[in-house]
Image (cartoon, rainbow, N blue to C red):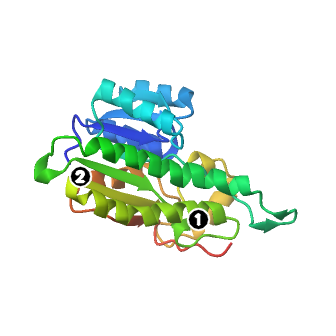
């Protein structure tokens, strides 16, 4: 898909991987809507890239529908959706205080998996009604999984389960929407220099980097964004969950 002048939505677009993606899509000529809960950061970035900032809870149907309607009335129907919204949680299934609180697991699944599904289903429903473009393509959806989907560490059970769900969702969604010219893919990033890891001490970052075969550093948000852009532009990538991790394979802990 040619990104220029296309309406795009990036969830979790106010910071980290989402912000880098929003910047790159805007640079490529897309009309970008940043959906996030942090409106201070979202508005700041939107002003920088001449985009649209929308307060959106991706796991809430009313909030998500409202976001799509606002995008449609401002930028036109979205042909690109990039799901970056999510949370990273840690905690053993059974800790010193006993079984982990069920609501902690539910919250992670709700935001990371149900939120991704919610935005995907609404985006696809809109895309199906649009006029086809070159080779019959109507839209592209890219979700964010994680290497934890494959090698979840001790303490990552909720996070790994949520991201494993994103991986498992990708192929059946791609198969279902193929007849409408809508492609669905996911990226499974490894250790990236995001605000979460960027706040760690330098020694901790060095130790994390040492575990990565090559290059021996944390991934850059711009590298994630570049892969999103390539997936959008390369029409033959469909139904894939692509690892972006420098050949990292996570150890049990």
| 58, above or below 100, in the image | above
Q: Secondary structure at mark 1?
A: helix
Along the line of sight, the residue nearer the viewer: 27 or 11: 11
Left or right relative to 191: residue 156: right
Residue at the spot x=49%, y=30% of the render?
42
In percent of width and height, residue 198 lies at 61, 49
**Residue 159 seen:** yes
Q: Quadrant of the C terminus?
A: bottom right
Task: Please state which of the two labelled residues, at mark 2 or mark 1, is closer to the viewer.
Answer: 1
Image quadrant of residue 244? bottom left
Q: Earlier in the sequence, mark 2 or mark 1?
A: 1
Give the spatial CA distance, label 2 vs label 1. 29 Å
In percent of width and height, residue 252 lies at 66, 75
Quick one: which residue is furthest to the right in this view?
Answer: 97
Residue that label 2 marks: 233
Residue at the spot x=58%, y=64% of the render?
161
Residues marked 2 and 1 touching at CB (< 8 Å): no
Q: Secondary structure at mark 2?
A: helix
| 248, above or below 82, in the image | below
Along the line of sight, the residue nearer the viewer: 32 or 115: 115
**Residue 244 seen:** no
Residue that label 1 marks: 160
| CA neighbours of label 2 inside 10 A, class few (<14), some (14 to 19), many (20+) | some
Residue at the spot x=56%, y=26% of the render?
40
Along the line of sight, the residue nearer the viewer: 21 or 163: 163
């Amino acid at each position: 898909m040619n990104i220029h002048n296309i309406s795009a939505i990036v969830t979790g677009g106010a910071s980290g991987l989402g912000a880098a993606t929003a910047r790159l899509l805007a640079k490529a000529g897309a009309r970008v809507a940043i959906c996030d809960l942090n409106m201070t950061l979202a508005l700041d970035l939107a002003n920088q890239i001449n985009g649209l900032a929308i307060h959106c809870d991706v796991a809430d149907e009313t909030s998500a529908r409202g976001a799509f309607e606002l995008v449609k009335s401002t930028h036109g129907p979205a042909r690109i959706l990039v799901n970056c919204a999510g949370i990273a949680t840690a905690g053993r299934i059974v800790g010193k205080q006993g079984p982990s609180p069920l609501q902690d697991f539910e919250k992670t699944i709700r935001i990371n998996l149900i939120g991704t599904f919610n935005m995907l289903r609404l985006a696809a429903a809109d895309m199906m009604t649009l006029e086809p473009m070159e080779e019959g393509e109507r839209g592209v959806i890219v979700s964010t999984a994680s290497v934890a989907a494959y090698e979840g560490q001790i303490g990552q059970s909720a996070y790994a389960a949520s991201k494993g769900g994103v991986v498992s969702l990708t192929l059946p969604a791609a198969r279902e929407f193929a007849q409408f010219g809508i492609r669905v893919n996911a990226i499974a990033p490894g250790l990236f220099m995001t605000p979460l890891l960027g706040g760690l001490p330098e020694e901790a970052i060095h130790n994390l980097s040492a575990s990565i075969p090559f290059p021996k550093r944390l991934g850059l948000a711009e590298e994630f964004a570049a892969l999103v852009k390539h997936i959008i532009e390369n029409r033959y990538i469909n139904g894939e969950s692509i690892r972006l991790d420098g050949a990292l394979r996570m150890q049990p802990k």
